[in-house]
Image (cartoon, rainbow, N blue to C red):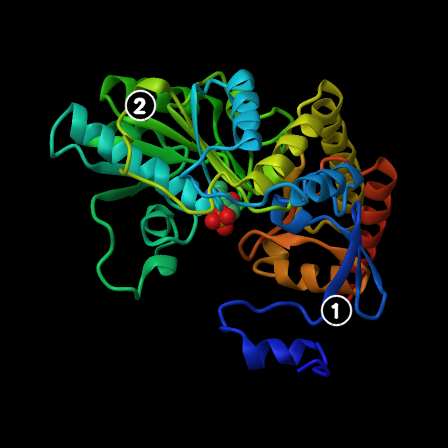
Amino acid sequence: MSNTQITRPLFDQLMVPNYAPLNMIPVRGEGSRVWDQQDNEYLDLTGGIAVNALGHAHPELVKTLIEQAQKLWHVSNIYTNEPALQLAQKLVDNTFAEKVFFANSGAEANEAALKLARRYAQDNFNKDKTEIIAFHQGFHGRTFFTVTAGGQKSYSDGFGPKPADITHLEYNDLSALEAAISDKTCAVILEPLQGEGGVLPICHQFAIAVRVLCNKHNALMIFDEVQTGMGRTGSLFAYMGLDVTPDIVTSAKALGGGFPISVMLTTTKLAACLTVGTHGTTFGGNPLACAVASKVFDLINTPEMLAGVKQKEKLFRELLDEINSEFSIFKEVRGAGLLLGVVLNEQYQDRAKDFFLASVEQGLLVLVAGANVIRFAPALNISDDEIKQAMAKFKNAIEVVVKG
Ligand SMILES: *Cc1c(COP(=O)(O)O)cnc(C)c1O
């Protein structure tokens, strides 16, 4: 085995075929740059799907990781540990939360949130209060409960009986929510900006109305900030820019800067229903992940970093507008902070993938969000110079696609 050539065909030979990775295999990264096996260089506007918020191999994160690795990696929740409590303190000090629960992925944080909502309703109201309201095109992860809450039916079809009593409504449709919500609703779960669903921002009035309606019906408002949390939109969490305080906020992707960790944030009152033994995870809150996330938190939660996100958004939008005035390929740039979506116009319907592949050829890594949206989720510390270089490459990629 030591002589095995590591190539893309080996993936098809060895791996469960649920992914379709690119042909190039990244081997090394530094900041917003990545190199493949042939030492080709790429500018990375994907950030590992909004995960590597401080870029690749950030020196301070590497240092923290090594220091903690030499001390203590994992102890299980039979014990608590110092890095977990340090990180929890930072989250509590800087958000609405009074209590936190750590897990390892976005799906697990949302799973905890949905279970908490059901449990809270069972304990405090009645057995019929089980309905969860979620939204079309929403994405909450791939465990069976969370994927069923997600708004893409095809993702949860074909696995047998689904977790029951989840209602899907149109995102941002206030009258649909008013009509559907009732005293049987235990929670409304939504993203403050739909990421996977097409980089679709929430209407400010809708966010406020969700809060009001949840209060009226004793339902919990769950904000899934797995993608928008930790500075992505220019606020530490997106709810902070929307004048609402949810009952539960989940976060993951950028939280560990590339080390897997997630969190559910909530209040003391709600947390009280998850008594000893009601929920748990072996790896959640391990010292290695928490030490790294704690350092990530310090580096992101500064006025300079958060203001930088808004400035860089402006630069992206300016450069994209310039490109569009030349090629007229998109009708809109939407999103917030450094989670931006380029929405293709009628002429280029369903061709986001073509622009994505042409970008790779130019040494630029971008994302798609559905068939019509090209998505950028770069590191929050990407430099202005790198943004300019990236947009020059993007322009070349567009030219190739447009000229056929
Ligand atoms: C990525 C994502 C998830 C799922 O996170 P995993 O770590 O893949 O489980 C959930 N919600 C949102 C909004 C996401 O963007």
350 over 308 or under it: above or below: below
Question: Does the residue at mark 1 contact the one at mark 2 (Cβ under 8 Å)?
Answer: no
Q: Is residue 273 left or right of residue 308?
A: left
Secondary structure under the numbered disc 1 in the rendered image: loop
Tell me the distance, in whole angstroms, between the alpha carbons under discs 1 and 2: 56 Å
Q: Which residue is drawn at 47% across and 17% down?
A: 96
- Amino acid carrying label 1: it is Gly
Image quarter of the N terminus:
bottom right
Q: Residues within 10 Å of mark 1 (few under 14, many from 20)?
A: few
Q: Residue at x 66, y 45 (%)?
A: 69
The quadrant in which the C terminus is found is bottom right
Nearer the N terminus, badge 1 or badge 2? 2
Q: In the image, which disc is placed on residue 404?
A: 1
102 and 307: which is toward the camera = 102
Give SS at disc 2.
helix
Mark 2: give few (<14), some (14-19) or many (20+) Cα within 10 Å.
Answer: some
Question: For residue 238, which quarter of the picture?
Answer: top right
- Residue 152 at what x, y percent from top left? 39, 53
In the image, which disc is placed on residue 270? 2
Residue 245: which numbered mark, if any? Answer: none
Q: Specify the farthest residue to the left.
A: 127
Q: Looking at the image, can residue 183 be seen?
A: no
> Residue 284: x, y in percent?
46, 42
In this rendered view, identify the residue nearer to me: 273 or 23.
Answer: 273
Q: Nearer the viewer, residue 319 or 223?
A: 223
Looking at the picture, how far across and down is residue 363, in whole percent? 81, 60
Q: Does residue 164 appear in the picture of this structure?
A: yes
x and y percentages locating residue 257 in the rendered image: 65, 41
Q: Is mark 2 within 8 Å of ligand 1?
A: no
Q: Identify residue type, mark 2.
A: Leu
Q: Which of the two marks, 1 or 2, is nearer to us in this view?
A: 2
Residue 350 is left or right of residue 318, and the answer is: left
